[in-house]
Amino acid sequence: MRRFIPFMKSEPLVAIVRLQGAIGMGGRGSLSDASVRDMLEKAFKRGKPKAVALEINSPGGSPVQSSLIGARIRRLAEETGVPVFAFVEDVAASGGYWLASAADEIFADESSILGSIGVISAGFGAHVFLARQGIERRVYTAGKSKSMLDPFKPENEEDVARLNRLLEQLHGNFIAQIKARRGDRLSQNPDLFTGEVWIGQKAVDEGLADGIGHLAVVMKDRFGEKVRFRRYEQKRGLLQRFGMQITRDALAGIEERADFARYGL
C-alpha cells in the first residue's frame, strides 16, 4: 500500500509487453497491430512506467503489420517520453527484428537468433497435378495482371519479374527502417541486409543488438533492485478459449511452426 500514500516515493515500474509468435493479419495467437494495440497503450500509459520492456520471440511475418506495430511503439514512446528496451528470446528475425528495432536498446541471450533483414514470398505450383487429374483451370479477369502468380497455372516469367520488383521495394523499406533506428551502431558487413542471421554476441558485434542480457537483470541494473514489473500479454478470444475454430487454428499453428523451423527452432 506504500505507493498509494501521498508524498511517499514508490518503487519504479517497468511494463513488460510480450510479443510472441508469427506476425500476420489475424489467426491463432498471431501478432498484428490490432491484436497488440490495447496492451501497448496500457503498457505506456498505466502507472507512469519508467520503461517499457518488450519480450520478443518472433520469426517474422507480414511486413505491413511489422511496420504498423513498430510505428505504434515509437509513437507511444515519443508521446510519453518512456524509453523502450527489447529483450530477444529464441529469435527476432525478419519482421520480429523489425519489432526489436523499435526499441531504444536491444538485448539478447547468448543463443538468441537475430537478423534476417530480407523479404520472402513462398508458394506452390499445382498445374501439373491438375492436368494429370484431367482438371482444367479457368480464370477470367479484367486487367492482365489480376491473376498474377496463380498457383494453378504455369509460372509466368513476367509475373516473377513483377514479384521481384515488389520484393525489392519491401526490402528497401526494411533496410531504411533498420538504418534509421540503429544508425552508426550497425557494422559495415556487406551481408548485413542479405537475410543472414547472427547469434548472441555476434549479433552484438554486428550492431544488431546492444548487449547480452536478460530482462530482470538489466532492468534492476538500470532502475534498482526494488523495480516493479507489470506484465501485458495478448488476450485469447472467447472462441479460442473454448477450443473453437480448431481447423483454422491447427493450420495457423503449422504455418507458425514452419516459420520458426527456418531458424532451427
Image (cartoon, rainbow, N blue to C red):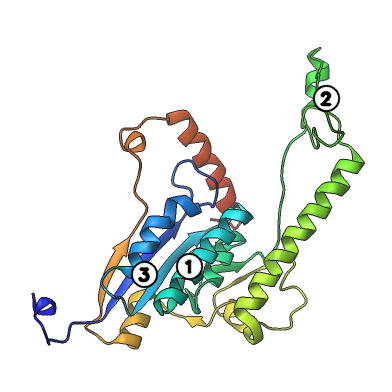
Dot 2 amino acid type: Val
Q: Are marks 2 and 1 in contact (CB under 8 Å)?
A: no
Which element type, helix, strand or loop, lies under badge 3? Answer: helix
C-alpha span from label 2 to label 1: 46 Å
Dot 1 amino acid type: Ile
Q: Are marks 3 and 2 in contact (CB under 8 Å)?
A: no
- Residue 128: which disc? 2
C-alpha span from label 3 to label 1: 9 Å
Residue occupying image coordinates x 82% and y 52%: 164
181 vs 28, nearest the viewer: 181
The answer to whether residue 36 shows anywhere in this view is yes
Q: Is residue 95 left or right of residue 174?
A: left
Dot 3 amino acid type: Phe
Q: Residues within 10 Å of mark 3 (few under 14, many from 20)?
A: many
Q: Is residue 62 above or below residue 180?
A: above
Residue indicated by mark 3: 44
- Residue 73: which disc? 1
Residue occupying image coordinates x 56% and y 42%: 255
Q: Earlier in the sequence, mark 3 or mark 2?
A: 3
Residue occupying image coordinates x 56% and y 67%: 113
The image shows residue 217 at horizontal and vertical percentages of 34, 80
Q: Earlier in the sequence, mark 3 or mark 1?
A: 3
Which element type, helix, strand or loop, lies under badge 2? Answer: helix
Outermost residue toward the top in this view: 134
Which element type, helix, strand or loop, lies under badge 1? Answer: helix
